[in-house]
Image (cartoon, rainbow, N blue to C red):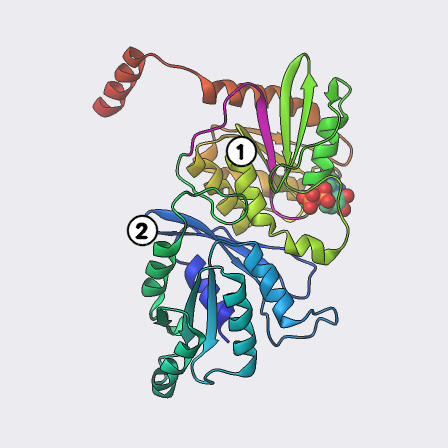
Amino acid sequence: MGKSTLFNRLTGTRGAIVSAVAGTTRDVLGGAVEWQGRVFALVDTGGVIGASLDPMQEAVAERVSRAAATVDLLVFVVDGREGPVPADDEVAETLRRHGVPVVLAVNKTDDRRARDRAFEFHRFGFEPIVEIAAEHGLGIGDLLDEVVSRLPPAPGQAAAITAAHETDAPPAAETRIAVVGRPNVGKSSLVNRLLGEERVVVFDEAGTTRDAIEIPFERNGKPYVLIDTAGIRRRKNVREIAEKFSIIKTLDAIKESHVAVMVLDARSGLVEQDLHLLDYVLTTGRALVLAVNKWDGLESEAKEKMRADIKRRLGFADYAELHFISALHGTAVGDLYPSIERAFNAANAHWSTNRLTTLLQDAVSQ
Ligand code: GDP
C-alpha cells in the first residue's frame, strides 16, 4: 500500500528520530517530523490489513481502534490504483466511530488511473483527501500541511505529540533523570543498577502517571526521580512491548527530565538511531550524560573503534561527560551520579544579566 514508503518520506524530511522495536514480526516504527515549526511524533502502526503472517493478528477493527486510541491524528493511506476495497470500508467505518481526526491520503496518484479514481474515496466521508505518490515524493508537503493544521493546539499530551525545541524543564525540586537509548542497549539493566546502589533509598511504589514509569528515590539525602522508559517491571510479551511505541515514551521521558542519561551500546557500536535520539535531547535543551554500556570483556580493538567513533561522530556533544560502564557487572555505574549532579547544576545555573551580556559580547567579538 506504500505506507512504509510514505513513512520514510515523512520521517526522512528532516531530523527524523526513527526507532524500531526489533523482535516483532512487523517492527513498530516511530519518528519525529518537523513541519512549519511544528514537531510531532509519527508512528507507523503496522499495516492493519494484509501482511497477516502474524498468527495472533486481531480483527481489523480492533487493530484500528487500538491505533486510533493512542494518537491525536491518523493518516489513513489507501491505494488509489486499487480503489476502495472492502477492508478500506471496514477501516473507515471504525475510524468514523472512533472519532479521531483523519487525513485520508490516496497513494500512487502518479498513475493516471489512480488519479481518476481518487474521488471514489470521498464516500468514506473524510475531508479533505490528499493525493500523494509516496514513492516519488509527490504531495508529501500537502499532506504535512493538512496534518499540521489538524493537530491539537497544545503539544505534549501524553501519548501522541511531542514538541521539540527548548521546552521548559520541570521545576527543579528534585533531579529528574531519564535513562534513554534504543532497545537492548541495557537501559533496564542500568536502571536496576542505579537503583540498586547501596546509598539509594527507593520510595514505595513507582508512579506511572505518564507513559514511562517514574521512580522517586533519595541518595545522600537528595531527592531524585528516575524516569524509566524501558520499564523495569516488564516484560509481559513481545507484542506488548511493540505496542508501547517506545519512541514516544522516550521523547516524553526526555521532556519530563532535567538530565538525560543516554545509553550507547559498545557492542553494536554507534548507529544512526543513537544520533537522532541525541539530537532530540540537545534540541530539547536537556542536560546530558553519556554512558557507553557493555564495556565488559570487550576486545581492545572494539574499544578503540568505539572511542574513535564517539570522538568523530559525537563531537557536537563533547561537553557531555562520558562514561564507559557495564550495567551487567555494575562497573563504573556509581560514577554516573556525580556526572548527573554536575550536568544538572550546569543546566540550572542562574546567571546575571550582566554576566550574560558580557558573554554574548565576547562571543560576538570573537
Ligand atoms: P534495554 O532494552 O535497553 O532495557 O536493555 P536490557 O537492559 O534489557 O539489556 C539488553 C541485553 O543486554 C540483556 O541481555 C542484558 O543482559 C545485556 N546487557 C545489558 N547491559 C550489559 C552490559 O553491561 N554488558 C553486557 N555484556 N551485556 C549487557
Q: Is residue 84 visible?
A: yes
Q: Residues within 10 Å of mark 1 (few under 14, many from 20)?
A: many
Residue plotted at (35% across, 68% down): 128
Residue plotted at (69% across, 37% down): 295
Specify whether 18 is left or right of 14.
Answer: right
For mark 2, what is the residue?
Answer: 36
Between 211 and 111, which is closer to the camera in this rendering? 211
The span picked out in magenta is 167-183
- Compared to residue 177, the image places residue 350 above or below, namely above
Q: Is residue 331 visible?
A: no
Specify whether 228 is left or right of 69.
Answer: right
Q: Earlier in the sequence, mark 2 or mark 1?
A: 2
Between 119 and 318, which is closer to the camera in this rendering? 119
- Compared to residue 51, the image places residue 220 above or below, namely above
Amino acid marked by disc 2: Gln
Residue 145, percent from left and from top? 33, 59
Secondary structure category for the residue under label 2:
loop
- Compared to residue 314, the image places residue 258 above or below, namely above
For mark 1, what is the residue?
Answer: 256
Residue plotted at (58% across, 65% down): 64
Mark 1 CB within 8 Å of ligand 1: no
Q: Is residue 58 magenta?
A: no
Say which mark, if any, is on residue 288.
none
Q: Residues within 10 Å of mark 2 (few under 14, many from 20)?
A: few
- Compared to residue 358, the image places residue 85 above or below, namely below
Residue 69, percent from left and from top? 57, 56
Between 333 and 354, which is closer to the camera in this rendering? 354
Q: Quadrant of ligand 1?
A: top right
